[in-house]
Amino acid sequence: GPIIVWFRNDLRISDNAALLKAAQQEQETICLYVFDEDADETTEYGGAQKWWLHHSLTALAKSLETIGAKLILRRGSPEQIIKELIDETGAKSVLWNRRYATSHIKRDTKLKSDLTDSDIEVISFDGALLHEPTKLRTGSGSPYKVYTPFWRAFSGMDEPRDPAPKPDKIVSYSKSLKSDSLDDWSLLPTKPDWAGGIADEWTPGEEGAWERLGDFLNGPINDYKEGRDFPAQNDTSKLSPHLTFGEISPYQIWAEVNAKQATHTPNKEVFRKEVVWREFSYHLLVNFEDLKNKNYNDDFDAFPWNDGKKHLEAWQQGQTGYPIVDAGMRQLWQTGWMHNRVRMIVASFLIKHLLIDWREGEKWFWDTLVDADPASNTASWQWVAGSGADASPYFRIFNPILQGEKFDKSGEYVKLYCPELRDIPEKYIHKPWEAPEKILEKAGVTLGETYPEPVVDHKTARERALAAYQKMKENT
Ligand code: FAD
């Protein structure tokens, strides 16, 4: 019987161990992707990622064709569909690359044991992470809770393996199989089509991923250590959505960065450390329970959050009156991505200035980010909230004015996403409410009309946040 290669978040043909194994067997192979209708809230794709998935699958089907394979699309419960496909074709073996969201691990383990019980061979491979998240342990045998020792332990492990080559040829299953039309899955927005800005910014698929990596290695990496904090500079790789969908593997990125002789070591090192933050997030996700819903530090269960529906909406829409926050939220909405420095600023603003539960922010990011990732999103939100492992202490409250002035001094980034502020001089770009009336008038800005007044006063909000934290401590 044929082999089934089950694609999930590994939408690539090079360094794809499961696919390569099928090619080496030289047996008829079925390449399958299932749109999971049984996904839970931790794994169900948000709107922006549905858009991405549509285009990524289109790209995958094309590249599979170049090696003689056809991508079969079905929707429903993956477990059921795989069992049906086995009945239909007499397949004897199922291959996949491992994935690590908690519910995915559970389901894959169960399916593997069910299939093995019915004499179907199942082999799973690595591909999404450089080291298995259960492998690294402290001296006393427990998982790491702090990044720096994790990084040290990581650096002491064997170097990640070399990426595997792309198979030359897949022997495609010879009978014809029913396959859905991608359009019937309705992954793309209809009216209004909010994805225009996302489409301008990104090329989903393996080829698009390699283009990004190439662009990054040809320039920005040489300034990564300093430049990565300045959102107007585009000095980061923008590989995150490609990594999340597995269009490129961390092994491939690792190897290409290492091979880049001309780049100074500190830039490479800082970049590698960021890639390992992703590994650390998975380490936390896999080794601790339900990080999406539960505070890692349960003192925060007693935190007096605000409901603040109006404030939440102002934040989501980029209408808080703080230019750096609004620019970030609008970049997110328009392009499906936000610069890391600005993610920290907007998250801190939601949690500390507006006193809104970090889980609200996590949800919004989940729906709007093209790189929404079950590990990195949750771990990062908990990190900003102060409730996470190795978190930034709650009482360290970002000042959105000073953050703006430090990391976007001239306001170039702000003006890109808040064009109504384009004529505000540098001195006031991060605090337009302090500008004299004459200057606002000249810039064509009327606060409260063309651009909002600040939804909260920074100093008052800061004192309120500290008082709320105090209250939490008294209650625990
Ligand atoms: P680069 O600077 O080029 O880094 C290279 C790669 O390293 C990234 O693609 C990413 O895979 C990894 N990486 C970098 N920084 C981090 C980090 N702090 N934590 C984990 N991995 C990192 N990243 C996601 O991939 N998905 C998310 O859903 C996500 N949500 C976030 C939410 C908040 C509140 C914050 C503060 C950060 C979040 N991040 C998330 C982490 C980080 O912002 C993005 O990974 C990064 O901005 C992606 O851009 P890049 O590819 O240009 O990064």
Image: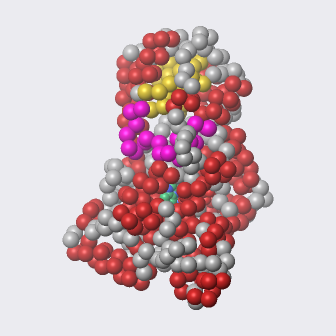
Ligand 1 sits in which quadrant? bottom right
Measured as percent of width and height from the top left, residue 441 is found at 62, 83
Which residue lies at the image location 63% right of the left edge and 52% below the top edge?
197
Give the magenta-colored segment's residue range: 37-56
Measured as percent of width and height from the top left, residue 84 is found at 43, 16
Check the picture and name the quadrant holding the C terminus. Answer: bottom left
Can residue 94 be found in the magenta stretch?
A: no
Q: Is residue 341 left or right of residue 61?
A: left
Measured as percent of width and height from the top left, residue 466 is found at 34, 78
Quarter of the rendering containing residue 168: top right
Q: Is residue 39 left or right of residue 10?
A: left
Which residue lies at the image location 37% right of the left edge and 18% below the top edge?
117
Q: Is residue 312 left or right of residue 244?
A: left
Quarter of the rendering containing residue 161: top right
Where 415 sits versus 376, above or below?
A: below
Which residue lies at the image location 53% right of the left edge and 68% below the top edge?
326
Measured as percent of width and height from the top left, residue 112 is found at 41, 26
Which residue lies at the image location 66% right of the left edge and 55% below the top edge?
237
Can residue 41 be found in the magenta stretch?
A: yes
Where 96 sits versus 145, above or below?
A: above
234, 438: nearer the viewer: 438
